[in-house]
Structure formats: C-alpha cells, structure tokens
Image (spheres, grey):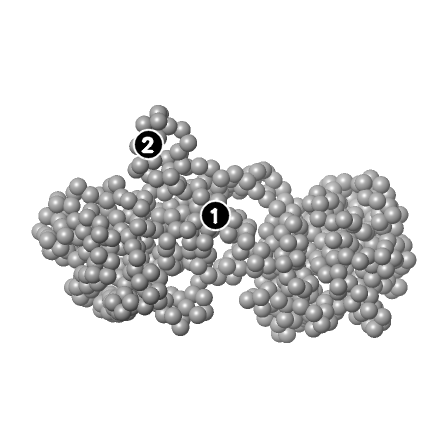
Amino acid sequence: MICIILVAGHNLLLETEILEDKSGDYTHLIGVPKALLPARPGHSQDTILDCWWNVVKSRNQFSDVYLVTNADKYKYYERWATANEFPVNNIVNDGTTTLENSLGAVADIELTIRSKGINDDVTVISGDMLCSHNIDLEQVNNFFRQKNGELAIYYEMEPDEDVGRRGIIEIDHSTSRIVQFLEKPKRHETKSNYGSVVFYCFRKEVVPMICQYTKTHTSKESKTLGIFMGWLVSETPVYAMKLPTPFKLIGQIGLAEYQKWVKVFSDMTLKSKTECEIITCKSYARIGLMGNPSDGFFGKTISLTISNFWAEATLTESTKLKLIPHPLYDPADFGSLSDLVGITAKEGYLGGLRLLQATCKKFYQYCMEHGIALTQKNFSLKYDTNIPRQVGLAGSSAIVTAVLRCLMKYYNLSDHDMPKHVQPKFILDVETSELCIQAGLQDRVVQVYEGLVYMDFNEDVMKQGFGDYNYLDAVVPPLWLAYIGDPSDSGKIHSDVKVRWDRGESDVLKAMKDFASLADCAKDALEKKDYAQLAKLMKQNFSIRRNIYGDDALGKDNLDMIEIAHKYGSAAKFPGSGGAVIGLCWDEQKKTGDDARISNKRVCIL
C-alpha cells in the first residue's frame, strides 16, 4: 500500500494574520506552511506534519510514502524531509504558487499517481489535520482490506460544530456503506453529524478512476476531495470507518481559531500523557423471576438485577496491555500439591481471566466488523466479584458486561456505536462462541438494561437479531435467595433438553410455551401487585421445569432447597440454571421457620 500525504493547500488568511500580528509571538512562523505549524503551543519543533509522519512510519503499513506540496512551500518541506529521514525524492511539487492557480486535492493525487507510476492501493491523508490520539493504522488497513470497496474515515461531530464546513456522510450501519456524501451541506439538508476527514483508502483497481475523473471534471471546484467523494459514492462501494476522536482540518482558518484548536488538542494529548486514566464499571447478578429457561427456546421471561451481588472491572491506561489475574479466582501459587487439589476440586480450572481475554478479543473484532477504528493506547485490566460461583446467578456474564462497559468508555464508544439491544448478544457470543459456555440471552439482557425487565424471544421477533425488551414499572415484593455453598458447574443442569427441543419432542415444545405464558401472567400480577398470584406462578414455573428436566438433572441439593421452602409455606423456583433458589413468602411465622431450616445453605434477603 502507498500513502500520499497532502500538504499543497494555500492558506492566505492564516499566513496574512501571522504576518500582521503585532504581539511578536508569531514572527518565527511567518511564511511557514500550515502543516509545519506547531501542534502544541510553545513547541515549534513538534509540528502537525511530525505527528502524522510518526504515525505513518512507525506502523510499517506502507511500502512508500509521498508528500505532495506546492512550489511556494517546496523548500520548507525539503528542509523538513532532510531533518526527519523522509526521502526528498518522494516529495512531489505540483508547481502552483497561489490559491488562485492551485490544482485541487484530487489533481494533486492524480499527479502523484502518474508521476511516480503508482499501481497499488493508496491511502490519502491530509498533513494539516489535528487529532487528539494516535490512530491504529493496522486496524484501519485491515478493515479496508476486508471490504470490497473504498474507505472514508469519519468522526462524530460535536453538536455545536458547523456541518457547513465539513464533508458529511450518511451511512447504512448494517453494512458500514456510505449512501451519500455531502460536501459542506446546510443543516436542513442532512440529519447526519458524521464529519468526513481527509483520510481515504482507495483500491488498486479504482486508482485509474481518479486519473480519469480529472480528465472529465476540469473545473477546480470539482477537484476538491468532497466533490470527488460525492461522485465516487455513486460509482463504486465506499465504506465508512469511525475514529472515536475529534479532528480539525486547519484549512482556511485564521490565527485565533488556529490557536484555539491547537490548545484544545494539546490539552487532550497532555491529559492522556500526564493523567493515568482509571475506569471502573459494575454489573449486577440477576435472578430469573419467571419464564426461565425459555429464553433459549423462543420463550418469554421476566428477570431483575439484585444489588446484593456484583462484578466489577477496573481498566487503567498503561504502556502495555496487561490482564491481571484475580488473587482468589485465578490462583497460580499454592501452599502444597494437596492445597492445589483441594482448591481445584472446589473452584474448578476456569477462573475469570479467560472472560477478560475473550471480551477484549471480541470487542476488537466487533469494532473491525462495524467500522470503528480504535485509538492506539493500551491498558491494564482487572476484575473483582462477590457473586457466588456456579449457582446460576450470571456471574460470568456480569464480569463480561463490566469489562465491556470499561472498554466502551475507554475508547469513547457510545450506545450509538454498540446499541443497547446489541450488547446482550455481544456478551452472549463472548461466552458461547469464544468459551463454549452454555447460556441464553436472558441474563445478558437484564444485566445490560438493569432493573426489572420483561423479555420476549418469540421466533418472529428474534429474526431481527434480538428480542423485544421492556422495563416493567412494577414493585417487586420482598424475595429471599438461598444458594449452595459447594456447587457443581451450573451449566450441567441444562441436561439434554436442547437436544430434545431440536428433535421437536412435543412435551419440550409445550413446556417452553407454558413458560412463556407464565411470564405474561406474572407481568400482569406484578402490575396489579397480586403477589399471591405471583407466588402460585412461581410454583408452576418450578413444577414445569422439574417435569421436563427430571430430578437427576436438577440435583438433590437444589431439590432439597425447594422442598424446604414449600414445606414452610414459601413459593420457590430456580433463578437460573441451578445451585440457587429464589423464594417468596407472606407468612412471617413460616418465613422464620423457613430461614432456620434452610440455614445449612447460604441465605440472603434481596
């Protein structure tokens, strides 16, 4: 791939205001081309072009880099090249000396392609753009190569930015393809706030179209990149990739605006270097109140998050990317071989570190697939949790959810970049696709949305790629939770029901429909505060589950907890895949006895 850096523009306004400035602070910048102006206040040795050259040369993504300038400023760039190990022969002089006789950016690109005999993919970057972070060029080029089309980089403009000073793109987010490219539109002409920057990638087979374009479009106005890209979008697929960082093209701005933006971006860069960014996010355990486990079988469920138990992820900016093992859940040091055996027998082989690693991997892949370029910065990542392990309270997905929130915040991604209804599927894929953990959408939905959530996973609804998720404006009655102190893997309780479902066994199909019906009835009971009815529905939910899964799959400890609860007048069911019981009891005397009998387990009030 070839890189062409454009620095041939003429900025009469900025040059004139520097020349006429009476403060004397800018005397040393008289005549200096805009790309060689300081990128930080008071640091004339760190120019805007230096920043881009450092990014381009350090990534080993390009076989050659060319710099195209005008005759008026050629000597400045020649001097810069000798001081920065840039080959002088790779500077292209377009021969222009004024704004009036300038060729236009597209003509400068064509001149470079023709004069240097370029027959390769081409990346075009403006050398006079300010941005706050390093760009991961490898990720940009990988996204470009996986798309059968051209690529335009964009960022999400601030609400007060003027779209009339930018190329604005409108995107089909399902494909990342640009459907319209508008050059400096009026605000009423578009609802988009996606600002294109002069950062484009063109395939080898499209490069001749650039040359042909300059022959058929002879006016200087038509040779601006914005007009050209508007034309190109109608001729060939052009895709968009978002950079989660603002940009500012120096272009035709005055001294005051230049000072303002240099300070803004300098402050951003300085803050990232001097302040160690620390991000902490939480996600809570969940209980399936009704309808589970039909979420994996096109059913309906009601779930809620509980504040008693949580998982927390902490991300700290660092020079190297480091995943930090949990001292308790990812043990590497043992007192003895006997100690190792005892801990392994109780905790298993799989701690939480794998969840962190898999989430980071899937996050990067998601950004690649959806055209989101990440800034080049690393981090250390650790987790903590007090969610009881392997008792079906969604402890694994809570860790993944917390990590995802940290990554989105760190890389400045919003719910627009990864919509809320998409996040549960992302979290599920981390566990099922990457780690082969048997799971359904229910847990991830309620942990993303939080609160009391009604979920419809009807097959027709799920064709859109996600279910119908709605908050319930209802008061949940006091509930209790009991869980086993030494559980087995909660995933085992799923038994062979999925296989039987796939075979179309009538009793399994009916059970899942019944679960969904119970969720609808429970929704009605909650809204009416009919908690006696809710208790009956909880008992029915368990009864159907026991019938379809069988006692062997449910396990003796789980059944013991249910039996004790029922004996002392409490409705009870499984809140997840097994290892815990959720209960609802109205008789205070019976509730006291219930607590006493079940005390050999671990009990808490939610």
Dot 2 surroundings within 10 Å: few (below 14), some, or many (20 or more)? few
Q: Quadrant of residue 291?
A: bottom left
Q: Is residue 114 above or below residue 354?
A: below
Badge number at residue 358: 1
Which amino acid is tagged 2?
Val
Q: Residue at x 39, y 41 (%)?
A: 350
Mark in the foreground, 2 or 1: 2
Dot 1 surroundings within 10 Å: few (below 14), some, or many (20 or more)? some
SS at badge 2: helix
Percent of width and height locating residue 335: 35, 25
Q: Residue at x 31, y 63 (%)?
A: 500
Residue furthest left in the image: 589
Q: Quadrant of residue 504?
A: bottom left
**Looking at the image, which is closer to me, 326 or 347?**
347
Percent of width and height locating residue 597: 12, 45
Percent of width and height locating residue 340: 35, 30
Q: Residue at x 45, y 69 (%)?
A: 464
Which amino acid is tagged 1?
Ala
Q: Earlier in the sequence, mark 2 or mark 1?
A: 2
Mark 2 sits on what residue? 341
SS at badge 1: helix
Left or right position of 596 against 311? left
Q: Residue at x 77, y 63 (%)?
A: 207
